[in-house]
Image (cartoon, rainbow, N blue to C red):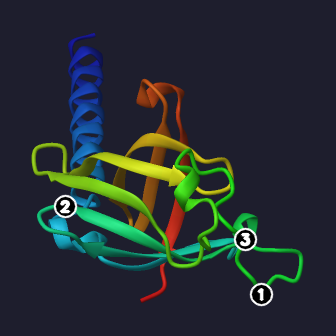
Amino acid sequence: MLKSKIRKFSLAVMFTAGLTGLQLTSALAQASSPSEIEGVWETQEGNFKFEVFEAGGSFAARVIYGDRLMEADGKTFKKDIHNPDPKLRSRSLEGITFLTDLKWDPQDRRWEDGNFYDGSSGRTYSGRASIRDGALELRGYAGTPLLGQTMVLYRVQ
């Protein structure tokens, strides 16, 4: 009976150690530096592509391609007709900076406090980003991140 208790205890210790190792591995798979987000990213389906760049202490991104931002011909970008600022409604959505003020949080190892502008609706959302296993996870939300939506993108350049 004592051997059985020792075996169960040993299994419990090994299981707990295994879980701790998995959590450590997962944490190590996260982004390790602020500039890691820079570059060109695209969805797996290829329906959205943008470039992230450093913008004076924070990060921003400009549109390269977005299928919801294109006219029926698939080549011409739509106008920003839903923009809340009437002066900007005649501009093309091509190359607009849709992501601004994304700041690196070294404690959480992710970028936070960003603003995402959705040119297809004219709405602006709060956002954050993280890199896990080489994929960029962008989370846009109104109010709380819990009620948001995440887009996963992969590095092109």
Image depth: mark 1 or mark 3 in front: 3
Q: Position of residue 58 (x, y in %)?
A: 19, 61
Q: Position of residue 91 (x, y in %)?
A: 59, 70
Circle nearer the N terminus (1, 2): 2
Q: Are marks 1 and 3 in contact (CB under 8 Å)?
A: no
Task: Name the residue beneath numbered marker 2.
Answer: 58
Q: Nearer the viewer, residue 76 or 44?
A: 76
Q: Residues within 10 Å of mark 1 (few under 14, many from 20)?
A: few
Amino acid found under the numbered disc labelled 1: Lys
Residue 33 sits in quarter: bottom left
Q: Nearer the viewer, residue 24 or 73?
A: 73
Q: Position of residue 48 (x, y in %)?
A: 62, 70
Amino acid found under the numbered disc labelled 3: Lys
Q: CA distance from mark 1 to mark 2?
A: 31 Å
Task: Name the residue beneath numbered marker 3.
Answer: 78
Q: Residue at x 24, y 37 (%)?
A: 14
Q: Residue at x 20, y 53 (%)?
A: 103
Where 63 sits versus 60, above or below? Answer: below
Where 80 sits versus 63, above or below? Answer: above
- What number is the disc on residue 75? 1
Circle nearer the N terminus (2, 3): 2
Q: Nearer the viewer, residue 61 or 87?
A: 87
Q: Residues within 10 Å of mark 3 (few under 14, many from 20)?
A: some
Helix, strand or loop under label 1? loop
Image depth: mark 2 or mark 3 in front: 3
